[in-house]
Amino acid sequence: MIVAERKAISDILQMIEGAGRVLVVGCGTCVTVCLAGGEKEVAVCASLLRLQNQGEDRDLTVAEATIERQCEWEFARELDELVPDCDAIVSLACGAGVQTLAAQFEDTPVFPGLNTQFIGIPEEQGVWTEHCLACGECVLDKTGGICPIARCAKTILNGPCGGSQDGKCEINPETDCAWQLIFDRLKRLGRLHMLEEIEPPKNWSHSSDGGPRKVKREDMIL
Amino acid sequence: MKAQQQRAAILCSCCGQVDLTEVEEALQSRDIFCWRHDGLCTEDGTEFIAGRMAGANLEGVLICACADEDKARLWRRTAAAEDVQPIMTSVIGLRDLPPDVRRREVLMAAAYQKNMLPVSVREAVSVPQKVLVLGSSAAGLRAVIDLAEAGYDVTVADEEELARRALSHLPPDLSGHNDVCALRDRVAESDRVCVRAPVQVTGIEGQVGGFAATFAHADGHSSADRFGAIVLAPGCEPVQRGEFLGVDVGAEVVPVSQFDDAMAREEGLSVLAGVRPHQVAFVVPSDATDTEVPFMSAVRAARRTRRVLNADVYLLCNDAKVTASGMERAYRDLRDDGVTVIRFDEETLSLEEADVPHTYTDPGEMAHPLTLRFAGEDLDGAGGAGSWELPCDRVFVADQLRLSRMGERLADLLELRRGADGFLGDDNIFQLPVDTNRRGIFVVGSAGRPKTAEAGRVDAANAVLSVQDLLGGGVMTVDHAAAIVQGEKCALCLTCIRSCPHTAISVDEDEGAAVVHREACQGCGICAGECPADAIQLEGYSDDSFAAALDVLRGVQ
Amino acid sequence: MTTGELRTSVIAFCCENSALQAVEDARHFGMTMPECVQTIRVPCAGKVEEDHILKALESGAAGVVLFACHTENCQYLQGNVRAEKRLTRLRGLLDEIGYPADAVLYASAAPAEAARAARILRTFADDLASVDREEAIEQ
Ligand code: SF4
Ligand code: SF4
Ligand code: SF4
Ligand code: SF4
């Protein structure tokens, strides 16, 4: 899932400066699951904005809404009635959600309330780690199901590097060395021979280096 | 949806003792209709309530009278008969409230009624009169017998042969070998008891009143059964010591549990490997003083050694624990038997081994291959730093105890909380003596924390009471779950499932949402507090009720 | 939303297994209690959500106390632990917006500790008042 983290309230306050009526919009999918932008976080964020404004001269009203998935037009349209009444939208969704709202509501500024972090998993409740960089050409078949692109600090395809120590990464000793994990897993699977193959340089044009990507399924296009 | 539903209040003036004017005004200003009566606690009162509600098509009713539990229940039923949801029926007493808070309390009660969620009513479900006892420590065997005598069908399952651990590690329960054997035989003979051992417990699904357990037997076949409640009794075991004070554990430095083991197998003092030692030290290090059990084992072993061998026996113990019951007595017994007790400070103790391992040729030979050394101020009596030595032939070390492996596996399988020391018992007073964090799962004996045989017996008796309390005569009364998941809002983030302290929530695959199991939910609302989608409401404490309460407080100011 | 009416008040979310009893007893025994304290009954401190506390502040409460059971004394095992963590986070959030974090307090009391509950509430209310005074002096 997409993992995100709330921006500092001070940043959000700066963005909405001058706006009198603000709509805080949450997303009921990924960011609800990673506890950053669900209905409760929307309530907290809206409350904080209102509280901060107490004692200030300007009038600020903050409305709240949470929709199923912000990255879908149909759901975004559920806000049709609320948006005309507001001067700014703070979206507590990932970047895709923010942009969907921005595209849907062209005349209203839409601000990101979260910093979208990565595609990852909850390591344990309250801790998330990055697991995929969406490189466009998955190599997990060769690496024992452990992604060297996202989980190796140097994105090395033929690892490990010389900095792997006691199974930890030299960039951050709290992080497992992805290549140690790959080695261990392949060993367990009895497929260590796979590491003898040298992996040629990756074609990054399938990744974001090739410009914005698009996926099509012809048969599904109505 | 019934048309035009109203809310009403039935107020009791308690023969004029309660001034209702203010309360009535406040309620009416919130569109709550009021009826008065001056003695609702009488027979006539109940009729009055029924009469007013009949056909009134009420959405909720607030009854203000000083009723006891039974009356309150009766009135709620009366209301339910008129189609008023139980939770929309509030009963609060006004007479004993100071006049200035009456108005507020009434308004609060009214506020809490608002926007409540519809719920089902309490119901009695039939439950199997069967109890599963997992593990066969001495306390567990005792529980098996007590439960069978109380009329339950008991299945006792263990990963090893029945009572094997209880017999091989006697110290944890401090039960005598004969006691355990007798218990085991009684269990085997009882026709109310089904023994499954050795067996692996492969899964336990469901909740109290309907635990479904699956077992994998040694011969490869598997079986399944349902139980109303579970009693855990996997016992504890000693932590293996590799070394003690730098000397390898082996023939000369020996864990006390090994001593006990040998005694249990009636091999006598064979741990002493043929020698007749003249100086023996028993040491209770600080890691073994969390409970009194390792200390007591050491005491018992020391006395025995002293009596049987007539050797010089020393018991070295830490200052840490002296208050537990029976401690004073133990010291006295030691002294009476002629065991020398030495209090020592862990920091100052060291142990040395003779360079050349000693081979005994003559069983009566004295060699003193070990030397315990105490360092400290003024040990030589001359005021300076010095040291004092105790040469010995054997050093027995009290064991540090831990939850048995089987206990650990069960804790994982059943998602049980473990105390700071890893045992299944918790320091939380609400879990004493035998409760776990899950309703219908109890823990007895040293799996909860190392304890004496006597304490284990008390546990077993308590477990029986708890089981009876829960399963009664085959009928368990369950309320609706206090926590209600609004399926369409649930994102299945699993937060509530992970954070429910009572393991009362699981995923409902069909609904695609979390589901609270009513028989296990204890109504704390922690799940609601955690849910990032605000998808859980707690009966009586919905989000709306908080908002309403705040409104009331603002209004009352 | 109307504000100001609760300006001088303290809302105490009280766990019904412990602190509620203590606070009620304190009132009953006539212990010195700040006039301004209003209690809201909760089943467990772990039920109280951040937004409930924020809403209380928004409604104009000068301060909010989250009153739980003592450590290892929560009937629901984890409620007080969760509550305290949640409150710590909330204080951080208040700090971020420049709101005095001391306006929210986590505290614990046993049902029999009426005097302790009263003292906690008194100290809290006094502290709030003195902060107000400082602000008044600044302005
Ligand atoms: S908007 Fe972002 S966070 Fe929300 S569902 Fe879409 S991808 Fe997930
Ligand atoms: S190889 Fe690419 S697609 Fe596969 S997990 Fe790694 S980043 Fe994601
Ligand atoms: S915490 Fe809420 S959203 Fe998450 S699984 Fe539970 S009910 Fe669903
Ligand atoms: S109310 Fe408490 S016990 Fe019930 S499901 Fe929620 S967290 Fe679990």
Image (cartoon, rainbow, N blue to C red):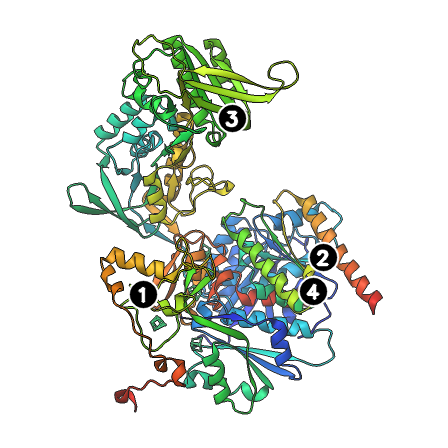
Q: Nearer the viewer, mark 2 or mark 1?
A: 1
Label 3 chain ID: B
Q: Which mark is residue C61?
A: 4
**Residue located farthest toward the right when viewing the structure as drawn:** C137
Find disc 2 in the rendering and name its residue.
Answer: B100
Label located before the other in sequence (2 or 1):
2
Secondary structure of residue under mark 2: helix
- Amino acid type at image mark 4: Ala
* Quadrant showing the N terminus of chain B: bottom left
Label located before the other in sequence (3 or 2):
2
Label 4 chain ID: C
Secondary structure of residue under mark 4: loop
For the residues labelled 2 and 1, the Cα–Cα distance comes to: 51 Å
B246 vs B330: above or below: below
Label 1 chain ID: B
Q: Is residue A1 visible?
A: yes
For the residues labelled 2 and 4, the Cα–Cα distance comes to: 21 Å
Q: Which mark is residue B509?
A: 1
> Is the same chain shared between marks 4 and 1?
no
* Quadrant showing the C terminus of chain B: bottom right
For the residues labelled 1 and 3, the Cα–Cα distance comes to: 51 Å
Q: Is residue B34 visible?
A: no
Front residue of C28/B464: it is B464
- Amino acid type at image mark 1: Glu
Front residue of B157/A179: it is A179
For the residues labelled 3 and 2, the Cα–Cα distance comes to: 51 Å
Find disc 3 in the rendering and name its residue.
Answer: B324
A102 vs B359: above or below: below
Tell me the quarter of the picture where residue B104 sits.
bottom right
Q: Nearer the viewer, mark 2 or mark 4?
A: 4
